[in-house]
Amino acid sequence: MELIMLLLCGGFAIVTSLMVIFAKNTIHSALWMVASFFFMAVLYLLLRAEFIAILQIIVYAGAIMMFIIYAIMMLNIRQEEGEKAPVRKSKVVGVVALLVLFLELLVVAVNKGVLAMHGPITDQLMQKYGQIAVLSNFLFSDYLLAFELASILLTAGVVGAVVLAKQKQ
């Protein structure tokens, strides 16, 4: 039953992610992204990562999407209804990246099976110290460089968005 739910939610996450790319209206695209975030949260719940699932809903589906929808409304991004939009390079790149990711996941699933790989985070460790303590310990010790690089990348994205928004005015 758990495997069926995992496959269903994974499939729905892929479908809603494709709808984000191919939606003609930007608001609809943002709403499909919210649905994708919710399916990802369900996947985290099925993987017994309740804290990450709650963060997924609160941070991404809640706060980040509200900022995106607010920015869409403030910038007044609209597309003429009679105008047929050409296929953009970004959509093609997005679909190619999705296919590459799917192929990578398929290779991992064939080589390792459906079960998760064994790692340093076990159920006993989670029960002894708690999920938040274990995750924060690994995040700020073993994966500190990746955490800092992700924060620099997100900061660069925010600066780039501000620069692009200022250029159009």
Image (cartoon, grey):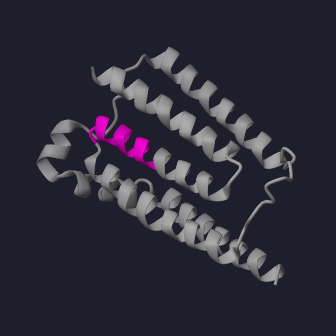
Q: Return the residue nearer the eye: 111 or 23.
A: 23
Residue 127 picture quarter: top left
Residue 4 picture quarter: top left
- The image shows residue 42 at horizontal and vertical percentages of 35, 40
Question: Quadrant where the C terminus lies?
Answer: bottom right
Q: Return the residue nearer the eye: 163 or 4.
A: 4
- The image shows residue 142 at horizontal and vertical percentages of 41, 53
Residue lying farthest to the front in this orientation: 82
Magenta residues (range): 37-48
Residue 141 visible in image: no
Compared with residue 77, is residue 88 higher up or lower down, i.e. above or below? above
Q: Is residue 81 left or right of residue 112?
A: right
- The image shows residue 24 at horizontal and vertical percentages of 71, 49
Q: Is residue 91 left or right of residue 102?
A: right
Per the picture, the main secondary structure of the magenta-coloured stretch is helix
Compared with residue 137, is residue 53 higher up or lower down, i.e. above or below? above
At horizontal 34% and vertical 26% (from top left) the residue drawn is 5
